[in-house]
Image (cartoon, grey):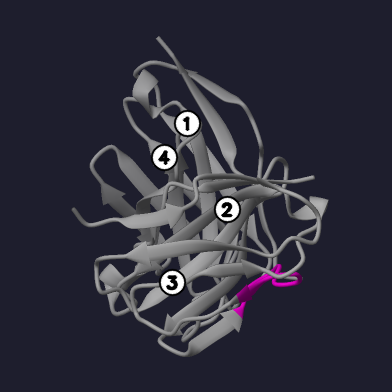
Amino acid sequence: QKEVEQNSGPLSVPEGAIASLNCTYSDRGSQSFFWYRQYSGKSPELIMFIYSNGDKEDGRFTAQLNKASQYVSLLIRDSQPSDSATYLCAVRFTSGTYKYIFGTGTRLKVLA
Amino acid sequence: EAQVTQNPRYLITVTGKKLTVTCSQNMNHEYMSWYRQDPGLGLRQIYYSMNVEVTDKGDVPEGYKVSRKEKRNFPLILESPSPNQTSLYFCASSPGQGAAGETQYFGPGTRLLVL
């Protein structure tokens, strides 16, 4: 059974701090890794994806992938109250398919 | 406006009464998928389709059917709904090719209650 694990939180950080969200996955053959944000009562929206080991930056967001340790993380710099949401980690395990496994999400609270 | 639409948005039904939730996208996307979201269990993929007439099972396909007769539509069918199918359902689509193909666009969700 392929799995994606996240700490459910809530993770509370003060405004302006760095929020660090983590995700581990079970299958070493995993291909693509995604971070989605979901506001309460809304649909998930993609923040970024990463394929290769290392860091990928997009504005205030940095995704980090370590395939040897089977984890992917999301850093949010200069956190804002508007970043308060649930962050979903997702993994596409197999190349050539669109089968996704999502984690249960980490709830982030940014305190003003 | 580029979007994924779902209908109905809210539905209350009774056990065993067949229902269909429609999903339509106007972005000419190759890939479409259905998910259900439950507290504590997260978002779980039910079925996905990589193109017209090509569908495959996700993680939780039992009790559901899908069809993809046209590129823009991907209806979810519950032939005999049961209370354990009470959930929030999302349809999603993506271009399906290259890096841009990785972005899934989600519909607004359909909240289903099966009594």
Circle 4 packing at 10 Å, graded few (<14), some (14-19), many (20+), is some
Q: Residue at x 43, y 46 (%)?
A: B108
Mark number, residue B89: 2
Q: Amino acid at mark 1?
A: Ala
Cα separation, mark 2 vs mark 4, equals 29 Å
Residue B45 higher or lower than A44, as above or below: below
Type of amino acid under label 2: Tyr
Circle nearer the viewer, 3 or 4: 3
Asked if labels 2 and 3 share a chain, the reply is: yes
Q: Is residue B92 left or right of residue A62?
A: right
Residue position for label 4: A75
Of pointers 2 and 3, the one earlier in the residue sequence = 3
Task: Give how far apart the Cα atoms at labels 3 and 4 are.
Answer: 29 Å
Single out the residue that lies furthest toward the bottom.
B53
Residue A54 visible in rendering: yes
Q: Which mark is nearer the camera, 2 or 4?
A: 2
Alpha carbon distance from label 1 to label 2: 19 Å
Q: Position of residue A86 (x, y in %)?
A: 52, 36
